Image: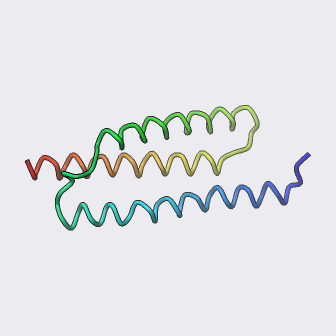
Amino acid sequence: MVPDSVIIVANACQVATTFISLSAYLPQWIKIIQTRSSVNISVHSWCLWFISSSFAFFYAVVQYLLNDRGWPLIISTLASLGSILFTISLIVKFRMRKA
């Protein structure tokens, strides 16, 4: 049996990944918005990351339903999905303007 203190620390680490990931997205978003161009960014890659994150979100929800634990994983995967969707929307928006 895993001690509750370890579970609390693990949950905190999982929530921290949300903020770390969001900080990694910010420079990309700022660059796209400032240059108003997304010509050199692969929308296909971002779509694959969206699919991957969707699977991770599904896994997190199933684990939560099975074990009644794992809400930090749901939060982080949902934040990742939202960030990826926002990035894709920026790519599409500024790709159209450039063309």
Left-right relation of 44 to 10: left
- Residue sitting at the far left: 99
- Residue sitting at the far right: 1
Q: Quadrant of residue 35?
A: bottom left
Count of marks overlaid on the render: 0
Left-right relation of 17 to 49: right
Quadrant of the image containing the N terminus: top right
Residue at 27% across, 47% down: 89
Q: Nearer the viewer, residue 53 or 8?
A: 53
| Residue 61: % across, % down | 62, 36
Residue at 62% across, 39% down: 60
Left-right relation of 74 to 4: left
| Residue 46: % across, % down | 36, 43
Left-right relation of 95 to 2: left
Q: Is residue 37 above or below residue 46?
A: below
Q: Is residue 67 above or below residue 19?
A: above
Residue at 33% across, 61% down: 28
Residue at 49% across, 40% down: 53
Q: Nearer the viewer, residue 81 or 52?
A: 52
